[in-house]
Amino acid sequence: MEDFSELKLHERLEFAVRELGFTKPTPIQAQAVPAIMEGRDVIGLAKTGTGKTAAFTLPVLELFLERHYDTDYEGPRVLILSPTRELAFQVERNVREFAKYLDLNICLLLGGMPYGKQLRDLENWPDIVVATPGRLLDHIQQRNLSLKTVDTFILDEADRMLDMGFLPDIRRLLDYLGSGKRQTLMFSATFPNAIASLATKLMNDPVRFDVTDPVRTPDKIRQMAYYVEKVRKPRLLRDLLAQPDMTSVMVFCGMKVEADFVYEMLKNDGRSVVVLHSDRQQKERTRALDEFREGKVAILVATDIAARGLDIKDVTHVVNYDLPNNFEDYVHRVGRTARAEAHGEAISFVTPADLLAFETIERNVGRPIERHSMSEVTMDGDFMKGKPVVAAAPAAAMPDGIVLAEGASAAPAKPVRRRRR
């Protein structure tokens, strides 16, 4: 598939696609969409930012229109599971954008949000349910929802779900799904053994598409490291943020308490800052993301909950206030900047205790990471003089920041929404 026009979508869905500016598919979309529309079970492996959500949303909506649009309501037909509230919000928003001219009811179920509103949404005949596993199980056990009618089951960011310990919940959910024919779609950045085992149980002769070919760290991301004592990291962060080009900065901390400390410190300095981690109330988390995404605040302090999957454009700098313990987490954090062919900088604070982890990261990056020191703040020494630890082999995969599509062409007048009920 080289163009979305080849899909011959329902006219209302096609109008939304063109209005959103989708013309040329990304690699995962070009491979997965036709297979999904043929009714095949699909495993899609692609990095964050490659258009995975559209890869399953478009064909699933088209299949719904073909199978159920003019039928009597029996129950939800599509179930989409996401590992975090932020990702579920993002998926639900994208589904609504594509379905804006269709008379479909979309229900979002996740923890930290008003239970009463979710009950009202469930009573309003939802066609599509987007949920996190814990809250979905809660509604099922309270008999607020049945999954017996679901014929399309989607696991988004499947590897992240396993990392967060959701495998037992997913196995419990399988018992609540109906026994009829079901199409299962699984999208992930990696394919560990646990996912392969789950796919064997869930899927029927799935076709697998992998567009995660390893590449070296993109040149558009400038990577730097500052050797600093732990107690002096606040001073170093303040000095860096004083630079005029630090206009949209994500600061990653290893623990929630550290994120709160950094947030309060910067807030007391009078800086435009918000914080995001799992102990914050959902309305606070949503507001923080929206304000940072819209450019209302310049700094987002976060834990690794914000490192993967979230679509935040124009991030100029990523600061690893706490260095991650492994290369994969480093990859996802750094991938928040230099998206959509932009340029960005990734700055890591390296304490004496971080040296081994830093050497491992640098070896996997495949090229030297710039070493820097700041007078009166950092410690000069072996870190500045030492030889970078760089492997001769190509590095592991980094986010590739593929642009979803180019501008839309002229389109007819907006269709009027049709009412099914």
Image (cartoon, helix red, strand yellow):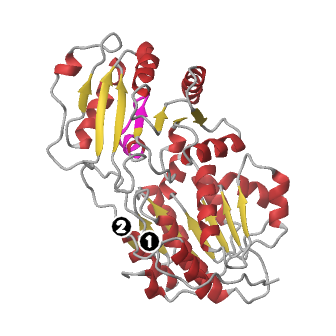
> Which quarter shows the C terminus?
bottom right
Q: Is residue 74 above or below residue 163?
A: below
Give the residue drawn at x 66%, y 44%: 287
Residue 83 seen in the current view:
no
The part of the chain drawn in magenta is 318-332
Q: Is residue 377 left or right of residue 307?
A: left
Q: Tell whether label 2 touches label 1 (CB within 8 Å).
A: no
Instruction: Give the residue pinned by disc 2.
Output: 210
Type of the residue with mark 2: Asp
If you read the primary sequence from the N terminus, does the residue marked by circle 1 or circle 2 appear first? 2
94 vs 331, nearest the viewer:
94
Residue 401, given in percent of the width and then of the height, sits at 37, 56
Give the residue drawn at x 41%, y 21%: 239
Q: CA distance from mark 1 to mark 2?
A: 27 Å
Find residue 420 and report its image quarter.
bottom right
Badge 1 element? loop
Q: Residues within 10 Å of mark 2 (few under 14, many from 20)?
A: some
> Which quarter shows the N terminus?
bottom left
